Amino acid sequence: PSEGGWIANHLFRYQGFWHHIRQLQGVLTCQSHFHAQDSDILLVTTPKSGTTWLKAITFALVNRFLYVDDPQQHPLLANNPHELVPFLELKLYVENQVPDLTTLTSPRLFSTHLPSVSLPTSVKDSACKLVYLCRNPKDTFVSFWHFTNKLRPAEMGKSSLEEAFDKFCRGVSLYGPFWDHVLGYWKASLEFPERVMFLKYEEMKKQPKVHVRRLAEFLGCPFSPEEEKKGLVDSILKLCSFNNLSNLEVNKNGKMSTGEEYKAFFRKGEVGDSINHLTNEMIKRLDEITEEKLHDSGLKL
Ligand code: A3P
């Protein structure tokens, strides 16, 4: 590995996108063996776009009877969201492992970082719903840079921000090019709005209630007037808030089966922190690339 980043140096290009070499076999296994069901819900993101938050919110939303039954025993209080909504290619289909997912109760909740071109064909052929959450590339990049540093063996020291940034801009990032990933799902959401919902992290932060209600409607489980009266939207948002989740014992001290500490998934949870890490030139370069890549798409990031 050179200075470019512990993860960025083990990338392998497949179907136009960069994957970690160790995860590629899982992607192939997932593509051949995952059978989507019409009632499935698939949460899709690029890394560091707010996956953990989206998983928590969707889990709480879909299983909201759990909250009503006994808020103190809610699974989110004792389990990290990544355990409740597992990644297809990173958790369920690792190497050649083919799990039996037929016994899970519906709606089954899964997540993926796969770009739209690489989704298993059964996802495209079924009527399952996809929720895509994107985040502005500056904050996503900075968040990812911090994340890789947390996962890097201590003896390797910090990765170079400049080198990682240059690679990101050239599209060489985990599941990148970032813009192609976002555009694939943006176009799918325009073409199949009943199947693909497109959300932005920044808008969720600004108007969480609006978007949680939209999400509930999209998933076919809108909040009833009684639930609204009881303040269930607020309760779900509070349960899934950065402050609440990041301070839970499980998220402070727990680990994924693959070894990553849960606390690595909670850093600041704010919009615009990239300004504290990127120079004006870097910001200008990233803004220009974003403008160029998205200019005729109707999407603004
Ligand atoms: P920062 O590094 O900018 O703080 P992912 O879940 O896709 O790995 O993304 C991680 C990013 O989402 C991190 O961003 C993290 O702090 C933020 N995040 C985690 N939980 C969150 C929550 N409940 N609400 C808002 N942001 C959250």
Image: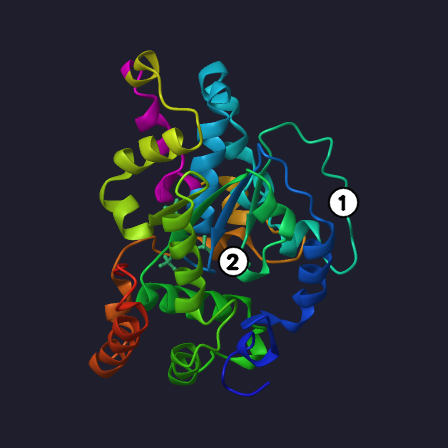
The structure residue drawn at horizontal position 30% and vertical position 38%, both measured from the top left corner, is 211
The magenta segment is 229-247
Count every numbered label the image shows and give the total: 2
- Circle 2 packing at 10 Å, graded few (<14), some (14-19), many (20+), is some
In reply to whether residue 241 is colored magenta, the answer given is: yes
* Residue 247 visible in image: no
Where, by quadrant of the figure, is residue 18 drawn?
bottom right
- Residue denoted by label 1: 99
Q: Horizontal placement of 195 versus 186: left or right?
A: right
In the image, what residue occupies the spot 42% across and 85% down?
Answer: 163
Residue at mark 2: C-beta within 8 A of ligand 1: no
Residue 298 on the magenta segment: no
Residue located beneath label 2 in the image = 116
Q: Position of residue 13 (x, y in %)?
A: 59, 76
- Considering depth in this image, is 270 or 130 the residue closer to the camera? 130
Find residue 114 and report its image quarter.
bottom right
Horizontal side, residue 23 vs residue 116: left or right: right
User: Considering the numbered disc 1 on the image, is that residue within a helix, a strand or a loop?
Assistant: loop
Question: Around disc 1, counting alpha carbons within 10 Å, would you say few (fewer than 14), some (14 to 19), or many (20 or more)?
Answer: few
Q: In the displayed structure, would residue 218 be above or below residue 277?
A: above
Disc 1 Cβ-to-ligand 1 distance below 8 Å: no
From this viewpoint, is residue 102 visible? yes
| CA separation in Å, label 2 and label 1 | 22 Å
